[in-house]
Image (cartoon, rainbow, N blue to C red):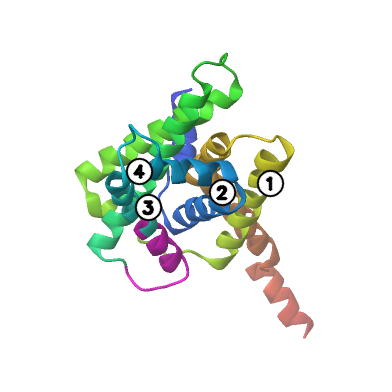
């Protein structure tokens, strides 16, 4: 049971590579474009009394927009990340998980516990794990591996289906949609990509003739 649990944790632990950061960026942009409620809440940060104010908002906006831009750039670039860029991207991932967890958690706080309540908890745990990783080694919190185009296409395709279901079929709020999509991006997309790699490697192995088959072909010739 211990080995099964460890294997499961290795598969679903938060992953902050280029694909997962790109998916979080895509979710943020898509929600901002299609959800008027989110845009209204952001605009309210400048107008409603008692709010932290535009300075506080602009500080977080710099973290999010800068990290989002770097995440999109590096997903399609082979240029190595600088230590500052990796720290900025890690801060973006941490802020994204934190916002998703807190916003969705506050929305579900007064409601009865149900399956969707797992996602904000998941977001918060992922953010805490990233904070721990950044405290130990900030430059290692974001993985250096370059994203492969098939993995980007697969991730965007699955994320688009999840986003469409949450937003248009289940009619979820922006907070719950954001929470679900961020949870997939950080923890579930990596196992899906691993399964794709295993299937791809298995197909290659089956398609490769053995040495014995090669000898038989040569004798026939």
Mark 3 and mark 4 residues within 8 Å of each other at the beta carbon: no
**In the rendered image, which residue does mark 2 sit on?**
31
Q: Which label was assigned to residue 64?
A: 3
Q: Identify the image quadrant of the C terminus.
A: bottom right
The numbered mark, 2 or 1, whose residue comes first in the sequence reads: 2
The numbered mark, 3 or 2, whose residue comes first in the sequence reads: 2
The numbered mark, 1 or 4, whose residue comes first in the sequence reads: 4
What distance separates the C-alpha of mark 1 from that of mark 4? Answer: 24 Å
Q: Which label was assigned to residue 94?
A: 4
Query: How many neighbours does mark 4 have within 10 angstroms: few (below 14), some (14-19), or many (20 or more)?
Result: many
Q: Examine the structure image and report whether residue 70 is included in the region drawn in magenta.
A: yes
What distance separates the C-alpha of mark 1 from that of mark 3? Answer: 23 Å
Say what secondary structure mark 4 lies in: helix
Magenta region, residue range? 66-80
What distance separates the C-alpha of mark 2 from that of mark 4? Answer: 18 Å
What distance separates the C-alpha of mark 3 from that of mark 4? Answer: 10 Å
Residue at (42% x, 31% y) in the render: 102
The numbered mark, 2 or 4, whose residue comes first in the sequence reads: 2
Q: Examine the structure image and report whether residue 152 is included in the region drawn in magenta.
A: no
Q: Nearer the viewer, residue 212 or 164?
A: 164
What distance separates the C-alpha of mark 2 from that of mark 1? Answer: 11 Å
**In the rendered image, which residue does mark 1 sit on?**
164
Q: Which is closer to the viewer, label 2 or label 1?
A: 2
Say what secondary structure mark 3 lies in: helix
Q: Residue furthest bottom?
A: 221
Query: How many neighbours does mark 3 have within 10 angstroms: few (below 14), some (14-19), or many (20 or more)?
Result: many
Image x and y of residue 98, in percent: 38, 37
Query: How many neighbours does mark 2 have within 10 angstroms: few (below 14), some (14-19), or many (20 or more)?
Result: some
């Amino acid at each position: 049971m211990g080995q099964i649990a460890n294997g499961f944790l290795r598969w679903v632990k938060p992953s902050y590579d280029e694909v997962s950061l790109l998916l979080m960026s895509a979710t943020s942009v898509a929600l901002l474009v299609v959800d008027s409620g989110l845009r209204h809440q952001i605009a309210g940060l400048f107008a409603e009394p008692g709010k932290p104010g535009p300075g506080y908002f602009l500080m977080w906006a710099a973290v999010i927009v800068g990290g989002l831009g770097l995440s999109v750039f590096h997903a399609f670039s082979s240029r190595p990340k600088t230590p500052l860029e990796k720290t900025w991207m890690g801060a973006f991932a941490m802020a994204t998980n934190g916002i998703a967890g807190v916003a969705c958690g506050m929305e579900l706080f007064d409601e009865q516990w149900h399956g969707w309540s797992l996602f904000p908890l998941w977001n918060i745990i992922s953010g805490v794990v990233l904070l721990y990783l950044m405290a130990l080694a900030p430059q290692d919190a974001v993985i250096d591996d370059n994203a492969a185009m098939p993995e980007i296409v697969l991730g965007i395709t699955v994320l688009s289906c999840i986003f469409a279901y949450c937003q248009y079929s289940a009619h979820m709020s922006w907070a719950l949609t954001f929470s679900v999509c961020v949870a997939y991006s950080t923890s579930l997309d990596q196992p899906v990509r691993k399964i794709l790699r295993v299937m791809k490697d298995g197909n290659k192995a089956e398609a490769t003739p053995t040495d014995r088959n090669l000898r038989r072909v040569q004798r026939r010739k």
